[in-house]
Image (tube, rainbow, N blue to C red):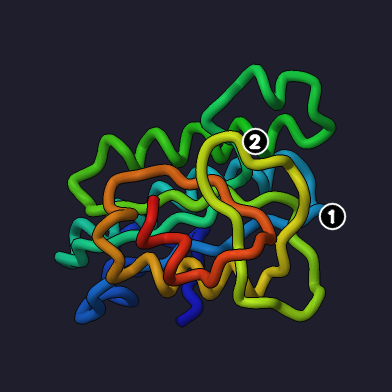
Amino acid sequence: MVADLEGSVEDLAKAVEGHDAVIFTAGSGGKTGHDKTLLIDLDGAVKSMEAAEQAGVGRYVMVSAYKAYDRESWKDSPIKPYMAAKYYADRMLEASKLTYTILGPGLLVNDPGTGKIAVGDGIAATSIPRVDVARAAVAALSEESTYNKTIDLMSGEIEVAAALKNI
């Protein structure tokens, strides 16, 4: 479903009411200014969390960014405002009452997916097809080993379901 992330929490809550989970994949895009980064990637994400809690949705999967949790890794990044927005949105999710999974993909590419990923600490920063991130987000919904965890992911050699099960 699509909803207006610049709208009210109440409107977002109505949009997610009756659903079991929220998968947050929205982003302001590379051609907008820092204002949209704050309004979508940070405030829109947090409003969607508040809406999920208000509507009684207990499960939330956040598509974040590779190593957003590590300020040192992005201190000199050309997309530092985006990374900061992801950092704080992720922290708000961790502090929420939601059962969350935070996925930190590398560079998103539009290549065909392989259905295979690499996950966890120490994976090299490379790229991952958007479709494989989507597969991981859907698989994470019911994979309890991902609950309340932050998981870096890139293209790899392990089937998505198996990779997430072994976190």
Q: Compare residues 127 and 29 and report the one nearer the observer.
A: 127
Residue 66 is tagged as: none
Query: Could you tell me the amino acid type at mark 1?
Result: Lys
Give the residue pinned by disc 1. Answer: 31
Q: Compare residues 94 and 89 and report the one nearer the observer.
A: 94
61 in relation to 119, above or below: below
Q: How crowded is mark 1: few (under 14 residues within 10 Å), some or many (20 or more)?
A: few
What SS does tag 2 mark? helix
Q: Position of residue 117 (x, y in %)?
A: 60, 62
Q: Compare residues 1 and 34 and report the one nearer the observer.
A: 1
Residue drawn where x is 84% and y is 55% of the image: 31
- Marks 2 and 1, Cα distance to the nearest angstrom? 15 Å
Residue drawn where x is 60% and y is 55% of the image: 118
Residue drawn where x is 70% and y is 77% of the image: 113
Residue 83 is tagged as: 2
Q: Compare residues 91 and 35 and report the one nearer the observer.
A: 91
Residue drawn where x is 61% and y is 45% of the image: 65
Q: Where is residue 112 in the image (x, y as percent from the top left)?
A: 77, 80
111 in relation to 66, above or below: below
99 relative to 45 in the view: left or right? left
129 in relation to 54, above or below: below
Q: In which quarter of the image is the N terminus?
A: bottom left
